[in-house]
Structures are given as structure tokens and as C-alpha cells.
Image (cartoon, rainbow, N blue to C red):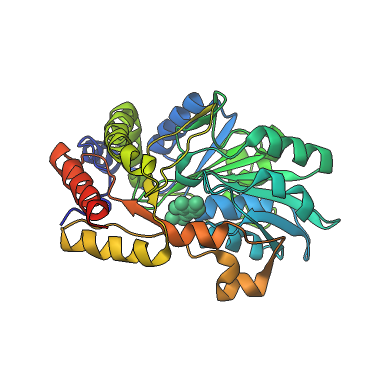
Amino acid sequence: MIPFNKPPYVGTELAYVREAVEANRKISGDGPFTQKATAWLEEQTGSQKVLLTTSGTTALEMAALLCNLSAGDEVILPSYTFSTTATAFVAVGARLVFVDIRPDTMNIDEKKIEAAITDKTKVIAVVHYAGVSCEMDAIMDIAERHGLLVVEDAAQGVLSSYKGRPLGTIGDFGCYSFHETKNYSMGEGGALLIRDPEYNEQAEIIREKGTNRSNFLRGEVDKYTWVSYGSSCLPSDMCAAYLYGQLLEAKRVYDDRMKSWTAYYRSFCPLQERGLVQLPVVPEGCVQNAHMFYLKCASLEQRDVLISFLKDKGVHAVFHYVPLHSSPAGMKYGRFDGVDAHTTAASDCLVRLPLFFGMTDDEVSSVISAVLDFFDRA
Ligand SMILES: *Cc1c(COP(=O)(O)O)cnc(C)c1O
């Protein structure tokens, strides 16, 4: 069976983990490897502040807290996303307002955002699906005109960019995930990127259990104490060591994934020309990171038959999000603004193919043959 995902492992990670344990004698948070991984991310993205977290979800929760919302404030987001884009804002008392997606990128439709704004709207939370950017110029323009904050769920978008700007650095806050299903991993982990330095101190306090320990470690205060609400958001330095090993090989991981992605894309273009499938669209100005390869079938029924056909051929393919506005919690905490023209219909037809670091040419060819075989019979 060709698995849908294999956790990324480049081979150097364990030497760094060993160094954390045996040489550094530092396995809790904010040790030398957290500093190294953070410095690498700041350098690569140009972000003035990156904070490593225990997950992408934790980064989203920190971002939601930093938005300083009051109960009943509204957050605009796509319905086609992972649960925690939403739960982070539910936890701070916000109401969710779901907006339709564009079927070409599966990202929030920037043209439908403005109609969803009310006098309670405070935040637009965008999701860069499959590591392909949302239309950030239009979205930042709307946010500026209405005085709204922008949170980028760039969990899938590490090392992708929009008009030359790394995803996660355009909005007020950017959130990365280093879960084992993402391009670069530490098992469970993530990062928060902060655009404006005015939020740095509050972010450090939230991350350090509500204390000003970060100021203390920098010698800015002579004792540390509980100053505000916070939690424990720092990952172990052992996990940061694993991530650091992988970040140093980021180019190799990127090229490897891109090779499989491009092979899929080229092989399925003829299917698209025959009108049998729709392939992912990467708009002008967007550079994607080969996080995911999906195609869209004609219907939900065909999608399900394709998945079971592939399973019989030894290929593990999967569908993706059930739109949040039709989930029990989504109905409780939010509403869909306008018409669901594409969210449900497009998600019903979508299937994701195996794509992971180290996928062999044979594995890629087997997946391609199986998919072509299916549509030849159809
Ligand atoms: C993976 C993912 C998350 C959650 O990240 P974790 O590190 O698993 O908490 C959030 N949003 C999106 C869009 C994701 O793909």
C-alpha cells in the first residue's frame, strides 16, 4: 500500500536530538535548538518575531488571544478549513462568520468578504489551502479600510509566498504547523509570526504561562512574576532539535515534494483537457510549496468510487474537510454569510493523492497509472 503520508525524516534529526539531550542537557523549552530554529525561520521569512509553539493550533490560539476580542465580536473565516482555525476564536468568545471559497484555489473568496462585515467584525482569518496563497492584496485592503486585524492560518504554507512575501508575514499574525502531516515537522509543533513589534511582549507572556520570564531572561526586569493571562505554549528543545535538522535540509525537502507534485500535474493535464477532472490552480504571483496534490472529480459519488478503486490498487487517497458550517459545532458557534455556492460542492468532489518527502518515482508512477486507469474505464 502506498501511504497517503509519511512523516518527514531527512536523516540528520536524531543527531541534533542527541545533542540536546547529552551535550546541551536542555530538554525543556527555549533552549539552544529553539533559538536556532527560530533564527532560521526569522531569517527565511524576514519576520521580526517568530515564536515556536507546541502546535499550529496553539499558534492560532495565541493569535486569537492577541486580537484582544470581546464576547460577541465576529471573525470572518472560510468554512472549508480545519476545526482549529475556528476553535481558537471560539475560545475567546467570538462568533464565527463563514464566507464561501473560490473553487479554483479552495481559498476564501476575497470578493465575498466585504458583504459579511458588520459593526461587530474584528478579524479576518484566512487559510492558505494547500500552501497556495489567498488574494492578500485585496484582503489587506479590506482589512485596512474597515480597521480589522488579519490572521493567516499558514499551517500548510511554510516556504510559500505571495508576490515575493512569505505566507504568514503579510497579516498581523501568521500561524505555521510542524505536525507530522506538514512539509517540515517536529512531530507536534508550530510557530507564531508577529508583524508588529507592539505585540511581542504580550505574546511572550501568553506563551510563558502568563509570566514575564522572557523579559527576565533578557535582563530587562530583575525578577519574574505572573503578569497576565497565559498558557504553556513552548515546545521541548528535543522537538526543536528535530525540526532544526529538517529546516537545514528545507531545500531538499521542497525540491523532492515539488518533483512528485509536478509529475502528478503533468500527467493529469490530459484528464483536465477532456473535462474529467479539475486540477489545482496556482494564481499569478503565488509560489506554492507542494504541500498537497488534489484533484476534483465530477461528483461526490465519483470521488468515493475513485477512492475505493485506488484502495484496491494499493493507493491510499483521501478526501478532506467537511465544511465547518455544516458541522455540529460550526452551527452552534457561527453562521454562513451569503450563499454556499462552492464550499460544499467543491469539497464533495476533492480527493488528495499520496505526497510525502522521499516518495519514490515508482510510487509516483503507480499512483498516476491507477488514476489514469480509473478515468479510462469511466
Ligand atoms: C494542520 C493544520 C492546523 C493545525 O495544526 P496542528 O499543528 O495540527 O495543531 C490548522 N489549520 C490548518 C489549515 C492545518 O492544515
Answer with left or right where residue 345 lies relative to residue 225.
Answer: left
The residue that appears at 21% across and 48% down in the rendered structure is: 367
At 33% from the left and 27% from the top, the residue drawn is 251
Residue lying farthest to the left in this orientation? 362
Vertical arrangement, residue 34 with respect to residue 48, above or below? below
Instruction: Residue 332: name its quadrant.
Output: bottom right
Which of the two residues, 190 or 103, is positioned nearer the viewer here? 103
Q: Position of residue 337 (x, y in %)?
A: 72, 61
Residue 254 percent location from the top left of the image: 33, 31
Residue 364 in view in this figure? yes
Q: Is residue 266 left or right of residue 360?
A: right
Residue 58, horizontal then vertical, whole percent: 52, 54
Q: Position of residue 247 (x, y in %)?
A: 35, 32
Quarter of the picture containing the C terminus is bottom left
Q: Residue at x 27, y 51 (%)?
A: 5
Query: In which quadrant of the rendered image does the N terminus lie?
Result: bottom left
Taking depth in this image into account, of 224 and 125 the one nearest to the observer is 125
In this rendering, does residue 233 appear at all? no
